[in-house]
Amino acid sequence: MKEGTDYELMLNDEQDENWSCRILTGEFSETVIKYHTIAVNEKDDNMSFNFHVLESPDPYATIDNDDLQEVATECLMAIFDTCIDEGSAKFTDRETGKDVTSEFTMNGE
């Protein structure tokens, strides 16, 4: 997925520093999702996250929809790839709350 083509990031509002993701193409076009907790487990080489649907013209665009979960995963992976490439990715140790550096890559690259 490509930012600006397949999805766009949107600041929720001036009071909220969190970002949302509007899907621009495909089955869930114009669906807006907001990611919440994102966790990367380097030992098991996996990632987990949760999200909410803020708005959608599709009544079937829910967090329980497997196809939307796949699209949300693809968007998040593309966002991570961009952040890592640009050097803006920030990782925090869950146990200590301290920032950590990582050689983390997406898709096993």
Image: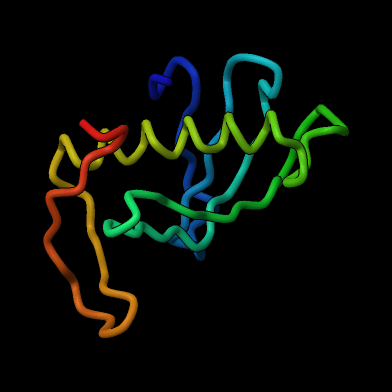
Query: Going by the image, does 9 lie left or right of 40?
Result: right
Residue at horizontal 70 percent and vertical 47 percent from the top? 54
Residue at horizontal 15 percent and vertical 68 percent from the top? 100
**Coloured how?**
rainbow
Where, by quadrant of the figure, is residue 85 drawn? top left
Residue 23, compared with residue 72, is above or below; it is above
Query: Going by the image, does 85 lie left or right of 22?
Result: left
Query: Going by the image, does 82 lie left or right of 47?
Result: left
The residue lying furthest to the bottom in this view is 96
Query: Going by the image, does 52 lie left or right of 88?
Result: right
Residue 28, compared with residue 65, is above or below; it is above
Q: Quadrant of the C terminus?
A: top left
Residue at horizontal 78 percent and vertical 35 percent from the top? 61
Percent across and percent down for residue 105 are 22, 40
Residue 59, compared with residue 33, is above or below; it is above
Instruction: Name the residue nearer the viewer: 6 or 74.
Output: 74
The residue lying furthest to the front in this view is 44
Percent across and percent down for residue 26 are 64, 14
Residue at horizontal 49 percent and vertical 40 percent from the top? 10
Q: Quadrant of the N terminus?
A: top left
Percent across and percent down for residue 25 are 59, 15
Total marks shown come to 0
